[in-house]
Amino acid sequence: MRAMVWRRFRKHKPALIGLIVIATFIALCIAVPLITNYDPGKTHLDIMREAPTAAHIFGTDELGRDMFVRLWDGGRISILIGVATMLIAITIGTLIGAIAGFYGGNIDNILMRFTDFMLSIPQLFLLLIFAQLLRSTNNPAISGGPMPIILIIGVLVWPPVARLVRGQFLSLKAKEFVEAAKMSGARNFRIILRHVLPNAASPIIVAATLRVGAAIITESTLSFLGFGVQPPTATWGNMLKNAQAQMTYAPWTAIFPGLAILFTVLSLNYIGDGLRDALDPHHVE
Amino acid sequence: MTQYILRRIIQAIPLLLVISFSVFLLMNLIPGGPLAAYENNPNITPEDLARLKTELGLDAPIHVRYWNWLTAVVRGDWGISQITRRPALTEIAEKLPNTLYLSLIAFFFALIISLPIGIISATRQYSWFDHFATTVAFIGQSMPVFWFGLVLIIIFNATLKHPNGGPFLPGGGMFTIGADFSLDDRLSHLILPASVLTFFSLGTHIRYMRAGMLDVLHQDYIRTAYAKGQHERAVLLNHALKNSVLPLVTIIGLEIPGLFAGAVITETIFSWPGMGRLFFNSIERGDYAVMMGILMMSATLIVAFGLITDIVYAFLDPRIRFD
Amino acid sequence: MFVRSRAKLLVSVIALTLLVLIVVACAAPATPPPAATSAPAATSAPAPAATKPPAPTSAPTQAAGPKRGGKVTWAVWQSPITLNNLLGTQTVMGDILSLVQEGMSEVGPDGARIPVLAKEIPTVQNGGVSADGKTITWKLKEGLVYSDGKPVTCADFQFTLQATMTPGVGVVSTTGYSDIDKVECPDPNTVVLKFKNFYAPYLALFSEDLIPKHAAGDPKDMAKWDFNRKPLGTGPFKVDEWQADSFITLSRNPNYREKDKPYLDQIVVRIVPSSEVAMQLLSSGEVDIMWNNTEADFPLLEKMAGVKTSEPLQIGGERLFLNMAENKDPSDPKKPHPILSDVKVRQAIEYGINKQRIIEKLLFGKAKPGTNEINAGFFQCANFKPRGFDVAQAKKLLDETGWVPGSDGIRVSKGSKTAPDGTRLRLKYATTSGNKLREDSQVLIVEDMKAIGVELYIENAPSSVVIGSWDAGSPRRHGNFDIIMYTTNASIDPHSQMMNLFYSKNIPSEANKGGVNYTRFNDPKVDELLEKAGSDPDQNKRRDLYCQVVAMGQETTNMIYLYQRLKIDSYRDRLLGWVPNAWDSPAWNAELWSLK
């Protein structure tokens, strides 16, 4: 089964390229800050806003920081935000969707009304309100660095996942193998985990892939509105926001973070697409 | 059927009540509020601030203020903005047409572009066309909107020149201020923001259309039609297209309520006086009445369109039944 | 065959879609778009006054006189919420209103008051100010009319006071006006202010806002006044139309009191919420003036052809507030801060900050190092010697007062009077988040402090938190901060600013939630000087008193003034007659603006 999925995925050329791009980016994010001599946060005021040269291949920013090092340092945070919010959203969404779909009845009703509730409030409002709430707490553990952003995005974007999972569970729980497991006296929790969830995994995996990219975009949007991760912590989003004013005379400060976001999210979209096709039971060649 | 609709509507009322109370509470939890703008002004004394708090009705306990708001709304009064001192409804009514004008046009273009592309991509899965179309669609979704918008302004306003010597395209606003109405002028102002919005939503639309079509093409009755020796065009027109209406309904149901709330980034970059800006400003300024107005109208629309989508689905797809 | 028919279908669908797109795309540039803004007013030259030759006598320097007519577009990134001065405090509102409304006097570029509606500025010497300072007599110029032609009379000042003091309508500030007992009108051209209590900045009252009784309405219905959206005044322009968040159009006031002025026919204020976009519009010529630039715009402004900048120095400026009381929530102002209560530590921090480097690297050399609260204008202190950048002195002070370098270079206390031995010299450094310049200068100051062995860690918060109210938990009010950085500046009369920052009764506490003396500055001698300065009608004497406070403030170093900022606006060089004025709106002399 796994081999077949991989074979199909490999056929989806753009998805394969996307996977390679993402792998390269992650490798760079891990490696560059480790092996370089440059401290990504160190300012060099004698080389402010220098165009790309051999020494600084992506140029320097408005405080003389090396853009190449800073880009991959910021990439760590951006990708961390993407992955962490995905994990939070998928965990909450799957939990709520699974319980609602599996048990049905009143539990389903209550959980789904709660999901409706979350979906009925414009996300921008919740994001901005919670960003302010978390940042105004005097607890550095949740008010500083990327933490508030991870928490708010993660906690706010699960409802579509919950709906998706619930739908899967609704259709799967009527299937024979689930009935058989119930007959054999297995506990509900075990049935959910061992029998239903693996069969519902495909759409969840696809949704998870797309969520990572969406969170990276959301972070940049929040940065634009002034509610993103706060400097000096770099992210692609706040690097891009800061580069706005100098876009015309120091374009490299805007181009590289912009392209990093573009290629990352594009690749993730393709991977999601490739996975969808590879995991799709209707797949016809 | 009627009973089902009635039940759904009755169910929606407590949901909206809970939403209204929750957002009212949340709004008041964040620091700031309508008086925040005066806090750092050396010429505004603590006495002034205390007086304003009373005069703007901010000193009552939160449940009292919520109750006042709720009873007023039931009577059709959405309150007075504590910032601009105008009725919240006036503020909203002023911006809503601008937003609908922009977002409906962008939505329309996204639909008519994604419809054929989605169908072709589905019928020719993995062809060069499919790859090209999805790439273009994905790019729109993968770029931060503000970055893309600013690049467009730098190119089409600050760099490229129109033959008449001015900028090639206006860099924002809805029309040339003070000029007489002209279609050209409206369109030239519309083209950049509408392109950004269209490009941004294209990806979602194409994906929905493509997935929906793929789903349909794999259905047994399509295979039967092919097996009967029908032409592809005929199959597409008779069966597939008709069924692709379903994903279309999903898109419309999901996105129309969002159109109401506007697109804050696009509106900011292109100086478009719409709902997105109004909403963002109201959050930033602590303009409770306007914020509540927008949130509640938006929530109502989302609930309503959820219901409408379900009903349309039921009409179009005989497999779906109401219980 | 099969393939072909399918292809045909595809082609026709695509073609149709593309066609629509192309039609829309081409329709746009087919005709000249924003002709009005981009093409200078070639047609509007023969202005309304064609029958009257322009009066060269009243025109400035140029022999031929400025050209009449034309339209100027002014981009502002803040969206006005009201145009009624009593209901808002936004900078943008004041700046736009200066086109429309005028008051008794205004402050010129040199910081001196210039009479506007008044004949002269009342002083004790010319008899306009009574000996006790509680009666101020203003004489209006003859024949003043509003833009609708109705006369300006003393009754309008009475009405303005009445409106300002109307309870329940949400007037934002009544400061100063609440000290007036009544306005007396011996004749329509004489306005006598009778004060209950002496109010030191009495000249600032009625200096911006005059509400014509006939154009307003019942003060109790102020929120509903049409006047809020369409103010009427004696200024060079009048409001034609305001579309919220979009634009305000203003046209020439035909009844303006100075002949042939204003020269321009129209001013369009365009609300462009993104300042980055506004810069591009300035560069393309779509707008003529960009409001309120920051220093970060300089590199781009310098590269723009045909763009000038206006950059007068502002008073006050960006500073560090050092918390001298304990950094608890809430703080007891009587208890000292474990580190910052030591004056030598505070002075060492100032010696250790390289202000010039911040100015050169972040402000493009375009500001001045900060000195003190009153560093410009009439009340400026002449004999003030600012503290320089002196790392050796900083280190020496820290050594002397019992802070010695630890193993990693950061100092720890060894014999400090304020902190137990072994305490690390580590302080929290906060500012409002989202401000690029502040965030960048934080990075530099952290580096500077590291060099003298002081560790600062950055913890920023949104401005609603940093500069919020007591009830919102604002750290500067509660006192749970070490160092906070932001800008504040005094008005031309520093009375309220000095009271806020140095008067001990203004220290915030649970009992005094509105207190604004954030550094917890507490000196009975200073209290006495401030009280004296606030009760003397003689401006020269007041200046001496304030300067004594300023000197004592420097000795105490409760605040470290980093840089004195510029008030930056930029405009295209086709606009003539611009005079930079740090004390007023960029459009303060718009009646003299004209086009090349």
Image (cartoon, coloured by chain):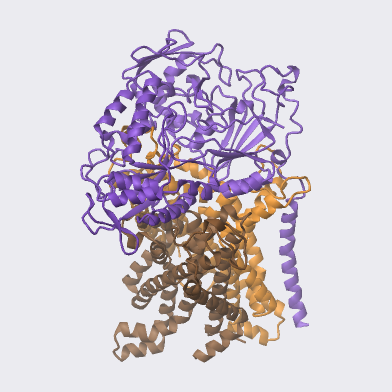
Q: Residue B17, how many percent across, how many down? A: 35, 54
Quadrant where the N terminus of chain C sits is bottom right
Identify the residue shown where x is 41% and y is 74%: A166
- Above or below residue B280? Residue C513 is above
Above or below for C34 versus C582: below
Q: Quadrant of residue B195?
A: bottom right
Residue A63 position, x and y percent, is 52, 56
Q: Position of residue B6 (x, y in %)?
A: 41, 60
Relative to C380, does residue C186 appear above or below in the rendering? above
Residue at 34% in and 29% down:
C548
Q: Give x and y (percent) for residue C208.
A: 48, 26
Q: How many marks?
A: 0
Q: Is residue A16 above or below residue C106?
A: below
The foreground one among A161 and B283 is B283
Residue projecting furthest to the top: C186
Q: Is residue B69 left or right of residue A227?
A: left
- C509 or B214: nearer the viewer: C509
Kindly indicate which chain is depicted in orange in the rendered structure. B
Q: Which of B255 and B303 is in front in this view?
A: B255
In the rendered image, what is the letter of the chain coloured purple? Answer: C
Q: Is residue B213 left or right of residue C546?
A: right
- Examine the image and state in which quarter residue C50 appears: top right
Q: In the rendering, what colour is chain A?
A: brown
Residue sitting nearer the eye, C478 or A16: C478
Residue B314 seen from this side: no
Rendered-image quadrant of the C terminus of chain C: top right
Q: Can residue C351 be seen?
A: yes
